[in-house]
Image (spheres, helix red, strand yellow):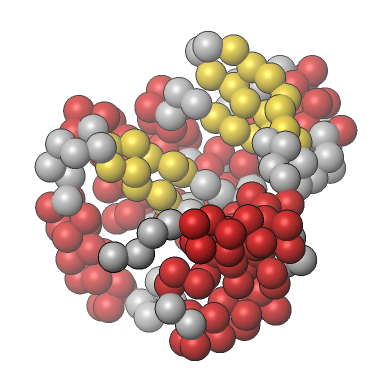
């Protein structure tokens, strides 16, 4: 995005073309992470708006993630599409949710003041607020230590460990190594016992 229009526009058009070739009717999940980077660019924002209106027909589901709710609410032309096409919304805890500017952004997403207050009091990395036509609720994933060993590897130390793991061991050893690294020894032992119990040809 920082290389300028001469590099960006051809790259985006090529990426759009390649991505759209994969939309062949099979169930597809398209994840647009750090969406604020793309919302600020008219070419990508326009394509994203068109995708949100049409991809459901092609069996494509879009996960649209951004750190700041205000990033999406700054584009009124895109806001109406996001609100109508993205039926399910999950909001994260936000200590600043009740400050006037941030609360206004949440209200543009349809949240009531009571819901905004819930976000302001929710616990980070534990609580999530679900909102859709089917209902609304604060929930927790309740992941145990074995599950977290696989889905919560995001620190720099974890990344170094993963780099070393993938360069030095075969893939069938990854699960046990991850569990041992995170100190979930009972689960690592269970994997080891299960692998010994499976007959080998």
Q: Is residue 10 above or below residue 169?
A: above
Q: Which residue occupies the foreground of this view, 75 or 69?
A: 69
Q: Which residue occupies the foreground of this view, 24 or 95?
A: 24
The image position of residue 83, as x and y in percent, is: 46, 26
What residue lies at 15% left-to-right and 36% top-to-bottom?
25
The image position of residue 19, as x and y in percent, is: 21, 55
As drawn, the residue found furthest toward the top would be 134
Q: Quadrant of the C terminus?
A: bottom left
Q: Is residue 45 above or below residue 84?
A: below
Q: Quadrant of the N terminus?
A: bottom left
What residue lies at 15% left-to-right and 58% top-to-bottom?
17
Q: Is residue 107 above or below residue 144?
A: above
What residue lies at 17% left-to-right and 51% top-to-bottom?
22
Q: Is residue 137 visible?
A: yes
Q: Which residue occupies the foreground of this view, 178 or 99?
A: 178
Q: Is residue 13 visible?
A: no
């Amino acid at each position: 995005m920082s290389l300028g229009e001469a590099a960006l526009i051809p790259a985006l058009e090529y990426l759009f073309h390649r991505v759209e070739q994969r939309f062949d009717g099979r169930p597809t999940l398209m994840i647009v992470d750090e969406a604020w980077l793309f919302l600020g660019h008219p070419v990508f924002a326009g394509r994203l708006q068109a995708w949100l209106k049409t991809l459901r027909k092609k069996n494509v589901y879009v996960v649209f993630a951004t750190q700041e709710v205000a990033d999406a609410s700054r584009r009124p032309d895109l806001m109406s599409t996001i609100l109508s096409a993205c039926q399910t919304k999950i909001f994260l805890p936000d200590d600043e949710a009740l400050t006037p500017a941030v609360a206004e952004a949440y209200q543009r997403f349809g949240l009531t003041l009571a819901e905004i207050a819930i976000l302001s009091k929710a616990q980070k990395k534990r609580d999530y607020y679900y909102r859709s036509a089917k209902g609304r609720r604060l929930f927790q994933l309740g992941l145990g230590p074995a599950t977290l060993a696989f889905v919560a590897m995001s620190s720099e130390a974890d990344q170094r460990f993963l780099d070393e793991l993938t360069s030095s061991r075969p893939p069938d050893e990854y699960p046990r190594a991850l569990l041992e690294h995170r100190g979930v020894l009972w689960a690592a032992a269970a994997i080891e016992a299960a692998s010994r119990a499976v007959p080998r040809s």
